[in-house]
Amino acid sequence: MDFSPYRLYDSAARLYRVYTEWMSGEDAWSMQVSLLCFDVLCHINVPKSQLPAGATLLRTILSSDKTNISVLTGNRVAHPLLISLANIKMETRLKLSSHAFLLATLLPVPKFVHNNKWMKGVLEACLIHQCLDIVLEPLKQAAKLGVMLSDPWGYSRYCFTPIASYIVDTPEAAMLAAVGGKMSPITMATYKEFGDDFWHEPCTSSTTLAQLAAAASKADPSDIEAYFREAQKFRLNGVHLPFWHDVPLSCPSSFFNPEILHHFHKKFGDHDSKWCINALGPAEVDFRFSVLQPIMGFCHFKEGISSLKQVTGQTL
Amino acid sequence: MQCFIVGVIAGHAPHDVIVAVWALMDFRYRIQAYHIMDRDIEVINSTLREFHSHKDSILNAGLRRGKANKPINNWHIPKLELMQSVVPSILRAGVPIQWSADLTEHAHIEQIKEPAQASNNNNYDPQIC
């Protein structure tokens, strides 16, 4: 476990910063830097403290994804919310056998009878946000006021628990960030700007909340249909109170971290490999893959890759 | 499949396409490291720039195709936009490999699917929780 943020360098001269754990990042540092430090160092870049002196940062990792629970029969889907702690070191947390992720709750998987297809999406988003609001209430209290918890050595610590990361796939990230489809959950980019080669302005919680307030001034939030139309003008999805609206130090632009499996491996399967197949023609690609020497530990594609339907992380 | 793709398409695909695919590949492998230094971040940024300066060749060659094999002439891929926020995220919150969904999907099996199979297929929720 890490309890204090640190800055890691590769030499004593502090030429190159090394980034590894969450605690080695800039977020943790800036949250923890206390007023005391501010006076001693008199460093210009040190921001004002966001936590009281002596507080311990415990960062929560949440993760939710729909998953199929029935084998062969039926179409039963569960929507679990898992919870973990970013303070646990990566080497432990990333091991499956350490059971670092625990089931927090099962979110409802509703079926709506409304006629409009888009209304169903809006209703589901509202419901999920409300459920998360209820489930995460203790977490929010701890993030606001702090809570006394004992660490593995038995010492009591004054802990604050903002959200560090929310591991989800892209459509669900958009839903949780309360932005509409085809929008980036973390930046202000719309789908037309997805190919731009620079980083768009982050979409912070204050921006989104200000837009929601503006929409609420024109339409009543309890009238979901009218409210959605107003929210749509601000590229939002019609959820009036996103679950993160009152969690301090947590903002969708920072807790939706890039996620290796979905963002990179699946993108390769969905796009990059298609470009290559189109460039060479399916027959040529399959032939070239089939003549590769099989290597232990790597997949070998005897039949080629052009007809693969669903690719998993392992085959990629 | 990812490990071989650059070698497999070499010599047949247009040069710029190979560069673009290679740049993405390089980017993808570099961000999976457990320790990322300032030096690596510069390299990551430069591979991403490399891709963006060569990406037009993919569209020009008509390789991005949708349904019915019609060429798509845009870059409306959300994940391409998300790649821009990788470096800021590393600086803020550490390496991306720690947020991999592989882990949570395995946790699903352990937390949800196994109890669900042990149940009697009725009223899942109280039996899993």
Image (cartoon, coloured by chain):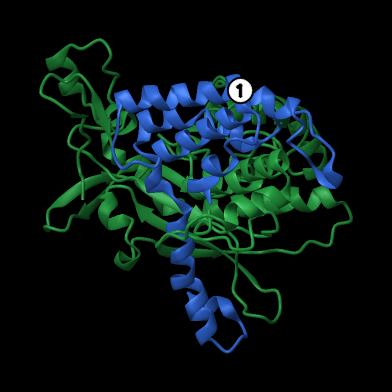
Chain colours: A green, B blue
Establish if A289 lies above or below A202.
Answer: below
User: Is A201 situated left or right of B110 in this image?
Assistant: right
A153 over B128 or under it: above or below: above
Numbered disc total: 1
Who is closer to the viewer here, B94 or A240? B94
* Residue A312 left/right relative to A35: right
Q: Position of residue B95 (x, y in %)?
A: 36, 39
The answer to whether residue A126 shows anywhere in this view is no
Does any portion of residue B129 appear in the rendered image?
Answer: yes
**Badge 1 local density, few (<14 within 10 Å), some, or many (20+)?**
some
- Pinpoint residue A69: horizontal percent, then vertical percent: 59, 74
Q: Is residue A266 left or right of residue A16?
A: right
x and y percentages locating residue B35 in the rendered image: 28, 38
The picture places residue A201, in percent across and down from the top left corner, at: 55, 20
In the picture as drawn, the residue positioned furthest to the bottom comes out as B120
Determine the residue positioned at 52% across, 22% down.
B50
Classify residue A216 by image quadrant: top right
> Could you tell me which residue is drawn at 48 percent across and 71 percent down?
B109
In terms of depth relative to the viewer, which is nearer, A293 or A308?
A293
**Residue pictured at 63% horizontal, 25% vertical:** B55
Which chain letter matches label 1? Answer: B
Q: Which residue is mark 1?
A: B54
Name the residue located 48 percent from the left edge and 78 percent from the top edge.
B114
Report the amino acid beneath label 1. Answer: His
SS at badge 1 = helix
